[in-house]
Image (spheres, rainbow, N blue to C red):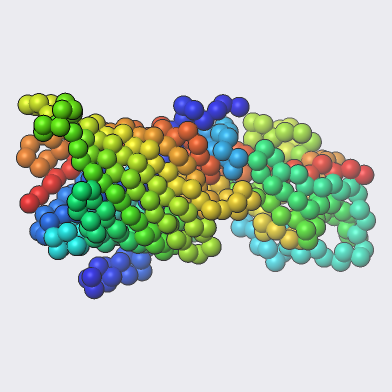
């Protein structure tokens, strides 16, 4: 049985997705940020309810196009966010594929404390815009229907996630330390409906920049993040597309962002889990273009 | 704020159905659509009929495979009309997986998937995750002694009952 150490997990489809933007720093009124991403993964193993990975009959592939946006409504006090999976395709090689709109998440964020560190509170609302029970269509045989049913594009439920983020930027600028950093800690309670078990979400993030000409266009961001479902082993629904009940993971992620021109930037990120259940074990990679506007 | 709520409501109300693309090789697609299981009939997992007139052929307890859980009992019975039937006890429960089917087999393991050439017989989509249910056993298949709950799309063994006379 292969251990989980070098496998990665699909994260982009899970509810509390993190973003390239650090939400501890709320937007000023009239400013915003837009991020368009493409995520790809392929895997032939699943994480079982015992956190062990097992081989599956065929390779699972997922393609996802996401749009994330932040917009400042009131300086410090109100930033709106939207996180939409505009397109999601789940495929099992030589079996079938489903494709369509994924789920959306909308958020409200407010800066509670701005110095000496940031404390921001938010409320995220998940909308069931995806299809939790795809069908193979009228006249399809029962195998096709089984395949379609097993590849949802959404979780089919409304959810709510009150979240707190603490953020701090430090280093360089006369501090004696040659690098510039930001760090955030995030915790949330993911309250779910329609029989899904609630979960706790968490993330620690460290961004690093070299404050030299040209090099200061880049940020290297390391994250530790996860979801801890409160569901017991028997309640886990091994949906494997990342949308079932009881999904749990802890992952580390690396992201490299580079500013191209003015507010335009590009990034590439990679997530690797070392503990997960109820999802496909795979190696997702995410490419994104973002635009920050004043 | 109001706009946001209206937008959210509109999006939720207009949840989009996903499209399906069949990627199976042509040889794996049946020529005629097979009927969807109907929990109210004997074709795909319905309540036992005339239980008092049936004779028990073999039975055995359900056991979960790997990390999955399965409990209860599976029984192979011969009905008064000579037809064989597989029946799950009312204490039957099994872990939730996508695409579960019930399989009768001679094999201790379903490695390589459902193999009709090795005597595996697919009885249909699992009707319910728990509780009593029954499945018609095709003629000539009553010599199999392993009953499986099998996650067909992902090829995972979920539960197994070994039947003994």
Tell me if A39 is positioned left or right of B89 in this view. left
Q: Nearer the viewer, residue A294 or B129?
A: A294
Q: Residue drawn at (52%, 58%), measured in percent from left and top? A: A197
Q: Position of residue A67 (x, y in %)?
A: 25, 49
Quarter holding the C terminus of chain B is: top right
Q: Is residue B129 above or below residue B67?
A: below
Q: Residue drawn at (56%, 26%), measured in percent from left and top? A: A2
Q: Residue drawn at (46%, 61%), measured in percent from left and top? A: A192
Tell me if B79 is positioned left or right of A21 in this view. right
Q: Is residue A251 above or below residue A202?
A: above
Q: Residue drawn at (13%, 35%), measured in percent from left and top? A: A259
Tell me if B144 is positioned left or right of A282 in this view. right
Quarter holding the N terminus of chain B is: bottom left
Q: Nearer the viewer, residue B17 or A203?
A: A203
Q: Position of residue A31 (x, y in %)?
A: 11, 54
Q: Position of residue A55 (x, y in %)?
A: 57, 32
The image quarter in which residue B11 lies: bottom left
Q: Nearer the viewer, residue A26 or A112?
A: A112
Residue B147 at least partly seen: no
Number of marks in the rendered image? 0
Residue A161 at least partly seen: yes
Q: Is residue B103 above or below residue B115?
A: below
Tell me if B93 is positioned left or right of B27 in this view. right
Q: Position of residue A203 (x, y in %)?
A: 37, 44
């Amino acid at each position: 049985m292969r251990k989980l150490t070098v496998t990665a997990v699909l994260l982009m489809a899970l509810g509390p997705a993190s973003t390239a933007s650090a939400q501890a720093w709320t937007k000023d009124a009239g400013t915003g940020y837009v991020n368009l991403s493409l995520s790809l993964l392929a895997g032939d193993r699943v994480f079982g309810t015992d956190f062990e990975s097992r081989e599956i009959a065929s390779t699972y592939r997922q393609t996802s196009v996401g749009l994330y946006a932040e917009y400042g409504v009131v300086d410090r006090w109100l930033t709106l966010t939207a996180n939409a999976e505009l397109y999601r395709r789940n495929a099992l090689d030589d079996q079938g594929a489903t494709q369509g709109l994924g789920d959306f998440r909308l958020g409200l964020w407010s800066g509670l404390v701005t110095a000496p560190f940031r404390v921001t509170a938010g409320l995220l609302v998940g909308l069931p815009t995806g299809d939790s029970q795809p069908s193979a269509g009228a006249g399809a045989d029962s195998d096709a229907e089984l395949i379609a049913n097993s590849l949802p594009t959404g979780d089919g439920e409304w959810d709510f996630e009150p979240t707190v983020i603490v953020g701090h930027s430090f280093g360089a600028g006369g501090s004696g330390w040659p690098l510039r950093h930001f760090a955030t800690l995030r915790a949330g309670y993911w309250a779910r409906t329609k029989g899904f078990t609630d979960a706790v979400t968490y993330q620690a993030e460290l961004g690093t920049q070299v404050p030299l000409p040209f090099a200061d266009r880049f940020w290297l961001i390391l994250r530790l993040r996860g979801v801890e479902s409160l569901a017991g082993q028997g309640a886990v629904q091994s949906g494997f597309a990342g949308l079932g009940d009881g999904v749990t993971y802890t992952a580390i992620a690396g992201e490299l962002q580079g500013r191209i021109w003015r507010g335009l930037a590009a990034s590439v990120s990679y997530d690797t889990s070392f503990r997960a259940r109820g999802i496909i074990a795979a190696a997702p990679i995410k490419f994104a273009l973002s635009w920050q506007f004043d | 704020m109001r706009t946001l709520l209206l937008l959210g409501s509109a999006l939720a109300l207009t949840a989009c159905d996903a499209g399906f693309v069949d990627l199976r090789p042509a040889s794996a697609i049946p020529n005629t659509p097979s009927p969807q299981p109907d929990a109210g009939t004997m074709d795909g997992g319905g309540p036992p009929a005339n239980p008092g007139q049936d004779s028990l052929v073999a039975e055995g307890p359900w056991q979960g495979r790997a990390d999955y859980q399965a409990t209860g009992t599976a029984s192979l019975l011969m009905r008064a009309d000579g037809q064989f039937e597989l029946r799950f006890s009312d204490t039957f429960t099994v872990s939730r997986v996508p695409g579960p089917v019930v399989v009768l087999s001679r094999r201790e393991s379903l490695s390589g998937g459902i193999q009709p050439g090795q005597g595996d017989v697919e009885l249909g989509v699992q009707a319910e995750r728990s509780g009593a249910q029954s499945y018609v056993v095709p003629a000539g298949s009553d010599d199999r002694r392993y009953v499986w709950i099998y996650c067909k799309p992902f090829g995972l063994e979920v539960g197994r009952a070994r039947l003994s006379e």
